[in-house]
Amino acid sequence: MELAQHNQAISAEKTNLSVYTQKQLDLIAKELNERPRKTLNFLSPMEKILAVL
C-alpha cells in the first residue's frame, strides 16, 4: 500500500492502528509533519519552528 493510501486509511476515526508496523506509522507521521499547513502560512511545522528560533 502506498503512503497516500496509508494516510487516507488511518484518517478515519476508530482505525485499528495495530495492523501497521511501527516503521509504517513512523513514515506516515514523518510525511504528515513535513506537510505545509495553511495555518502556518504554508510552512511545514519544522520550517515554522526554525523561523521562530
Image (cartoon, rainbow, N blue to C red):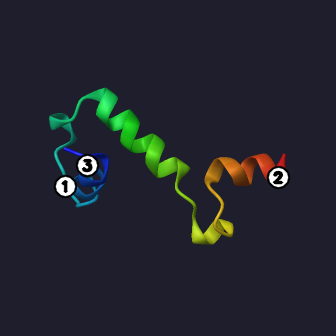
Quadrant for residue 9, please give it: bottom left
| Between 15 and 50, the one nearer to me in the picture | 50
| Between 16 and 2, the one nearer to me in the picture | 2
> Looking at the picture, how far across and down is residue 23, in whole percent?
33, 28
> Looking at the picture, how far across and down is residue 8, in whole percent?
26, 58
Q: CA distance from mark 3 to mark 2?
A: 32 Å
Q: Amino acid at mark 2?
A: Val
User: In the visual, does 27 lie left or right of 45?
Assistant: left
- Numbered badge on residue 6: 3
Q: How would you rate the neighbour count of disc 3 (Cα within 10 Å): few for under 14, some for 14-19, many for 20 or more?
A: some
Q: Amino acid at mark 3?
A: His
Residue hosting label 2: 52
Q: Amino acid at mark 1?
A: Lys
Q: Earlier in the sequence, mark 1 or mark 2?
A: 1
Q: How would you rate the neighbour count of disc 2 (Cα within 10 Å): few for under 14, some for 14-19, many for 20 or more?
A: few
Q: Residue at x 63, y 52 (%)?
A: 45
Quadrant for residue 28, please give it: top left
Q: Earlier in the sequence, mark 1 or mark 3?
A: 3
Q: Secondary structure at mark 1?
A: loop
